Image (tube, coloured by chain):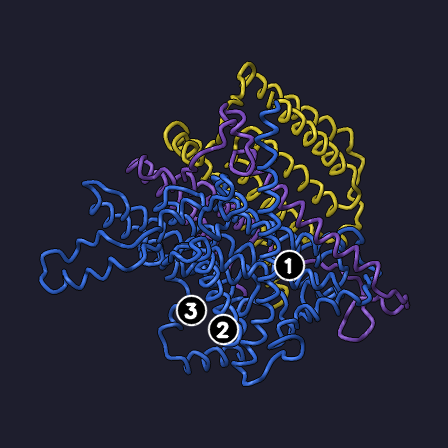
Chain colours: A purple, B blue, C yellow
Amino acid sequence: MVHPAHPPDLSTTQERCYKVPDGYFGQYVTIGIFAVVGVALVFGTLSLAKLVRPNVPAKDKYTTYESGIDPIGRGWSQTNVRYYLFALLFVVFDVEAVFLFPWAVVFERLGTQAFIEMVIFIAILAFALLYAVKKKVLEWL
Amino acid sequence: MSGLIDAIGPAVIIALVKVLVTFVMLLGITLLVVWAERKIIADMQSRVGPNRWGPFGLLQTLADGIKLFFKEDFRPRTADRWTYAIAPIATMVPAFLAFAVVPFGNEVTIAGHPINFIVSDLNIGILYFLAMGSLGVYGIVLAGWASGSKYPLLGAIRSSAQLISYEIALGLSLVPIALVAHSLSTLDIVGAQAGTIRNVTFFDGIPVLEQVANIFRYVPNWYIWSQWPAFAIFLVAGIAETNRPPFDLPEAETELVQGFSTEYGGIRFAMFYLGEYIHVVVISAMAVTLFFGGWSGPGFDFLPWLWPLFWFFFKTALFVYLFVWLRATLPRLRYDRLMWLGWKRLIPAALLWIMVTAVVNTEGVSRNVRLGVFAALFLLVLAVVLRGDPRLKEAVTPQRRRTQGRLSRGAA
Amino acid sequence: MAEIWQEVVFWVFAVAMSLAALRVVTSSNVVHAALYLVGTLMGAAALYVLLFAEFVAWVQVLVYVGAIVVLMLFGLMLTRAPIGKAHFDNNQRLLAAVVAGALFGVTSYIMVRAFDGTDVNFARTVGTKAGGLGEVIFSAYILPFEVVSMLLLAALVGAIVVARKDEEVEGHNAD
């Protein structure tokens, strides 16, 4: 996007970089303001509620929910190993997606060679998915 | 130095105003969406829905919020204090931060300052959107873990596995958009969809069709026409990311009570609730931005700055309606079906579509050759992936026999 | 003159990161340690932004914060010990300190050797675009790029082999 008519005193490149909200750092300053305003609002709401809400302690209120009966054992339990495998598959394909984006943006300029490189890359990871399917990692029943 | 401060002064005010306006707007819309959902679902179920507070019950959400505000808040004895307190904030913050890269109106000039209706037009806007989505997992994991209770922990692990599975499909469905737009900036992507389809030369020389093809001059140049498979993947993955029906397994009340938020009440629970609806608005707005031309639409001389805003919110509202419609219509997915859909259908389909888009969009002599070779290669890979899947066989047999087969298998 | 602000912001983030990093190793609750690690990694992302490496910064958030720490949390939930309350501490602190110190020394040495004397050009207006990165990866660094995919494949196959073995034993017991 071309922005018409910058204010005239933003002549040097460094200053333009700091320009809020469109300069490089300016953009992040704006996002920072956005985050700070949001966090302040959420935090403020939570703290304000603390001031106005009733507080009537009773022992049984502080037990955990277990379908109406007293909880048995501890709340922390061990999970199935297959969740971990999904998380690992996720990391693998997340990295793949991350490599795909810079490739996609300049694909037209790079042409056939980059395309073949990417096909090899995807094929190897598709093989990983295929292996996971073959080993029935993705089956639940 | 004084020049720098002079330059920054009004700009910071602009940024602050922008942020506040966006924030108030986002929250206002979200409250409206909560109300609209209850009203629409009531209508679909032949009920009246909220009608006590304000006209048409418009203030119902506000009333609910105030009620939750004055509710006693008790933390389970077993809970981990700080993590328990952080989890609602960790749900809300990434949800609204993702809205920072959504352009919701055309550029206007106020007092000589050009202002875009976008909090921040990052170069890598799409990546930022995905990163914020990936941070959303933390709210759920922390809430489930910090409660020190069984249902929340089970719900949290289950739903974080769901979120990370569909995050991949969501990310991959945006790669074709980057391919055709040559940019990751949302403003550039909306810009690339401006105007109407003009260069349809396919029917040239054919007497009647040539005239009929003129109609394309009036069709907006949105990515949905060429990128509908990517859109389908984006939509399914997006709904799964928001934990909305039919992907609302995190709070499958018949199985997990209230899932990760079981031990939360009062205003803290309201934060999780609000976070979910902000997420719905953000995903809808992102779908509009990436596939439906963002704020573009017919403008008129009367209040020219208003029309882009109107079109943006109109399109977003349609998507929110779709979300509600799906909730009223579809039953919840079974967990194994959910994982099957994510990993064995959406991800391979997204990879295939990336390759197809890449091949089709390259100009060159070897284009047809490449199209053939690589489409065939990936169809082959896909066929191999799907070959051993018994469900494929089930999919082609009639519905009744499938159910019977599964029942008898279960009995055996 | 503008660089002063960058310097100030750098030190703010650097100090915050160091404190978070210290808490990672001193926190007795492993989930808290993972959360401090998130803080450290976010700080690193902020430093990348300061260095105009926008793309890398958000990849840092997406992959490290969004995926790898989540993987760690999943791993923690697999441990037999009650989550968070366990004392994973043991008497190998000295060894750990030596290994960590050596690793720090080696990586710092390599970094300084590779980039010493290279000035970051702060007279810029935009961050490094994803496109520029793509061009470099797909022309100069093709081999590392393809090796990455093989590495990911190896990691996945390894994990599946290890995890599935347990499953099958469990399955036999159940029968």
Q: Chain of mark 2?
A: B
* Circle 2 SS class: helix
- Disc 3 vs disc 2: which is toward the camera? 2
Q: Disc 1 marks which residue?
A: B157
Asked which quadrant contains residue B10, the reply is: top right
Q: Residue at x 21, y 54 (%)?
A: B200
Q: Disc 3 marks which residue?
A: B391
Q: Position of residue A110 (x, y in %)?
A: 32, 35
* Circle 1 SS class: helix
Query: In the rendered image of this protein, does residue A39 appear above or below residue B365?
Result: below
Q: Is residue B393 left or right of residue B5?
A: left
Crowding around mark 3 (Cα neighbors within 10 Å: few <14, some 14 to 19, many 20+) is few
Crowding around mark 1 (Cα neighbors within 10 Å: few <14, some 14 to 19, many 20+) is many
Query: In the rendered image of this protein, does residue A60 appear above or below residue B47?
Result: above
Q: Earlier in the sequence, mark 3 or mark 1?
A: 1
Q: Position of residue C150 (x, y in %)?
A: 45, 39
Q: Chain of mark 1?
A: B
Q: Please, what is the three-letter code of the amino acid marked with disc 3?
A: Arg
Q: Position of residue B224 (x, y in %)?
A: 36, 58
Asked which quadrant contains residue B209, the reply is: bottom left
State the residue lying farthest toward the top: C117
**Distance between the Cα atoms at labels 1 and 2?**
28 Å
Position of the N terminus of chain B by quadrant:
top right
Q: Please, what is the three-letter code of the amino acid marked with disc 1?
A: Ile
Q: Please, what is the three-letter code of the amino acid marked with disc 2?
A: Trp
Q: Mark 1 and mark 2 in contact? Answer it, CB < 8 Å.
A: no
Q: How many marks?
A: 3
Q: Disc 2 marks which residue?
A: B325
